[in-house]
Amino acid sequence: MGLNRYAGMPVIALLSVLACSSGNGAAAHPTPPPGAGAAGIGDADFPLDGNGGYDVSHYNLAIGYTPATRHLDGVATIDARAAQWLSRFNLDLSGLKVRAVSVDGAAATFARRGDELTVSPAKPLAQGAAFKVKVSYSGQPQPLKDATNLGTYGFIPTADGAFVACEPNGAKTWFPANDHPADKATFDFQITVPKGLTALANGELTGKPTTSDGRTTFRWREGHPMTTYLATATLGDFELRQGRTPGGIPNVTAVDPAYRGSLDSLYKDSSRITDHWVKIFGPYPFSSTGGVIDNFAAGYALENQTKPLYGGFHPDDGIIAHELAHQWFGDSVSIKRWKDLWLNEGFATYAEWLWWDHTGKATTEATFRRNLARPAGDRIWSYPPGEARPRNLFNESVYTRGGMTLHALRKEIGDRTFFRLLKTWTEQHRYGNATTPEFIALAQQLSGKDLRSLFDVWLFQPRKPAWPT
């Protein structure tokens, strides 16, 4: 995700990309009674995000949206497997009225409390059993607002449609979900909008849009596992360009007419950057690349899987490089807990620096040194990036000091081992989840060095590292 943060960097109008994380936060949710899935997935910093007792494998989302009334009708069909004996379980859903719920075709009882939808199947589910939940719901989606972190996020109504950027926990504003990155799933989207508008979602179209009675339906499929916060249904008036990168990867880019002057540059930059990252990070993990610029002044970008979303600005190649690096770091290799956010944002920030080096704007060493020159009282030194805090997820330290950690590691283990480490990391955890201790262990294994002190001073100490000038 991205904000205006790094004044003076060598890229014009640089918008640094942010994602979402957690650190020292609220206490864990009480243990549920036997047979009940927990109301949280187990992330102590976000105790009610996600849910326990089951794993989702697939979401099939059929939604209709009318911008004039801001009304959404939805049917979510969720394929999951019980991780325990379940007499009831929760889904995350914010606002919206639930009309009916069924489990394996049988009507289920349900209750609402805050953002928790509690479902009680007609018959309990055995541990290991596959099951299908169908939720019918409707209403006016209400985005979430958090001034200390991101601002406004989730399903955000716009004049001509909706801007949908959900990190960290905004998926629940438009569909019922196990809304935490620890539970990834594949997605199908069926989005119906007034004729003349375009609906954009993750993955690729499964066929041509169909129009009936003045409304058009778009069907998209993301066949690779995805966290819920990366799901999007951004819709409105868009101009599209489609093709392939020189390396052969399908490229789908779209811009609001207010940004039509950026369509070609977004398409070309997304193509060349994706192909370059393939050389640095390993095979592209998904079936298409691209990006979307919407005319909504979000003040950030988000690395929605296959289609990064830029909120109300012309992105330069630095921020595009950041968002596309996230396709490997954050999207394919996802975090298990929000406090490890630097694994997303530090890596994508360092990718920006690598891109500047590649294009001759500034060397990675020069960028590292410029940040190292910041005085000991600078805010990035008091915030350890290895433990992102729930009330301040998008702190600059997670980005800048996270990126500096990688450069310090590169200097310690050498280029050959460092870049082998990046490719090994993305290969070993492809489509899965990972943690900071796992990255440290892999770095030590490949380098044959004890790196605990290096990672400690860069990631976990609330002070400026003592580093040679």
Image (spheres, rainbow, N blue to C red):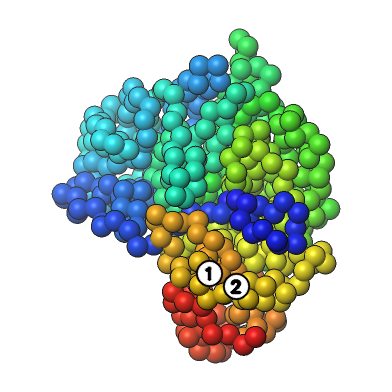
Question: Taking 9 as reference, is 103 left or right?
Answer: left
Q: Which residue: 75% across, 58% down?
A: 11
- Can residue 128 be seen here? The reply is no
> Viewed as shown, does residue 4 lie left or right of 444?
right
Which amino acid is tagged 2?
Answer: Arg
Asked whether, in this view, residue 404 is left or right of residue 142, the answer is right
Q: Residue at x 56, y 54 (%)?
A: 18
Q: Determine which quarter of the picture holds residue 374.
A: bottom right
Percent of width and height locating residue 382: 46, 70
Residue 151 locus on image (x, y percent):
49, 43
Q: Nearer the viewer, residue 370 or 285?
A: 370
Q: Secondary structure at mark 1?
A: loop
Instruction: Residue 378: give its label.
Output: 1
The three-letter code of the residue at mark 1 reads Asp
Q: Which mark is residue 374?
A: 2
Between residue 102 and residue 343, name the one nearer to us. Answer: 343
Q: Please tell me in which quadrant of the rendered image residue 258 appears.
A: top right
What's the distance in space between the residues labelled 2 and 1, CA to CA?
A: 6 Å
> SS at mark 2?
loop
Q: Quadrant of the C terminus?
A: bottom right
- Checking the image for residue 187, the label placed there is none
Label 2 neighbour load within 10 Å: few <14, some 14-19, many 20+: few
Query: Looking at the image, can residue 35 be seen?
Result: yes
Residue 267 location (% of width, % of height): 78, 44
